[in-house]
Amino acid sequence: MHLVPEEREHWRAIDEHTVCDAIDAIGDPERVHAWASRFALLGEPGRLALLLSLHRAGPIAVSDLALATGIRDSAVSQALRLLRASGTVAAEKDGRIVRYRLVDPQVSALLDSLG
Amino acid sequence: MHLVPEEREHWRAIDEHTVCDAIDAIGDPERVHAWASRFALLGEPGRLALLLSLHRAGPIAVSDLALATGIRDSAVSQALRLLRASGTVAAEKDGRIVRYRLVDPQVSALLDSLG
DNA sequence: CACAAGCCTGCACAGATATGCAGATGTCGA
DNA sequence: TCGACATCTGCATATCTGTGCAGGCTTGTG
């Protein structure tokens, strides 16, 4: 993160050192994107409620999630589809009912930190 | 969270105990909404990059944030407006430049936990 | 076999949002 | 005072996304 004088000309930074720190703080863009995706999943009240339920109430059926959260089972299914596709939750089929559980340890840790 | 038999009739829960746990896990809807809002702010790669920069690189000017993140200063301004409105960041004016800093301790803690 | 329960999906629609552009404001330097 | 610079804003647009409805699929039950 050291630059030769001529490169600095193009930058026009106000606080050069601060900008370098900022760039370092961002780090790998892929990592940022991955975390942003995770946060986006938690960023909708309905899904957050679902995840909180899944987090504490272990494997739980779709219709029970709908009961607990007050969301129509159609919407619950859609939400779970997203969470499944992102590897946040996993499904275990038991006859005609499907129980979901939280499998992403990062998300699990985040939910723990909510106090 | 105990129900008389007749109330259970309406529920049709699959795993009643699990549903109660789920409801407890959700807790106060306002708290859920507050956290969802926070997560939503972190849920966009650009804003997350901005917040990471603000988190480590202390008070930093808008144009420097634009430099570090590669986002046009117009978009940076818009993003900072949201973050300001939600009480996540604060601005300190110094002449014609404005430096922002992260002020929400909860968000700060989240960013720390990203490793 | 017929029916109901649990779950999933397609589709259409409404609301939210991120973004770029153009321009306004306020501030510093010559 | 004039121009350059830093920042902010309004507006128009395109995209995304959450939701409801209707219906389909699978599994268990009478």
Image (cartoon, coloured by chain):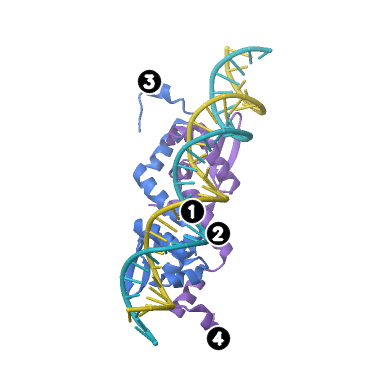
Chain colours: A blue, B purple, C yellow, D cyan
Whole-percent x and y of residue D25? Answer: 32, 66
Residue under pointer 2: B33
For mark 4, name the chain.
B
Q: Residues within 10 Å of mark 4 (few under 14, many from 20)?
A: few
Picture quarter with the N terminus of chain A? top left
Dot placed on the residue nearer the N-terminal end, 4 or 2: 4
Residue for badge 3: A6
Residue B42, compared with residue A8, is above or below; it is below
Q: Amino acid at mark 3?
A: Glu
Amino acid at pointer 2: His
Marks 4,2: beta carbons within 8 A: no
Label 3 marks a residue whose chain is A
Residue B103, percent across and down?
55, 48
Q: CA distance from mark 4 to mark 2?
A: 32 Å
> Does label 1 or label 2 sit earlier along the sequence?
2
User: Alpha-carbon neighbours of circle 1 within 10 Å: few (<14), some, or many (≥20)?
Assistant: many
> Can you tell which mark lies on residue B6?
4
Q: What secondary structure is marked by label 4?
A: helix
Distance of label 1 from label 2 (alpha carbons) = 10 Å
Give me the residue at 51% from left, 32% from top: B73
The residue at 55%/36% (across/down) is: B99
> Of helix, strand and loop, which one carries label 3?
helix
Q: Is residue A55 above or below residue B59?
A: below
Give yes or no for contact between labels 4 and 1 (Cβ–Cβ under 8 Å).
Answer: no
Q: Nearer the viewer, residue D2 or A16?
A: D2
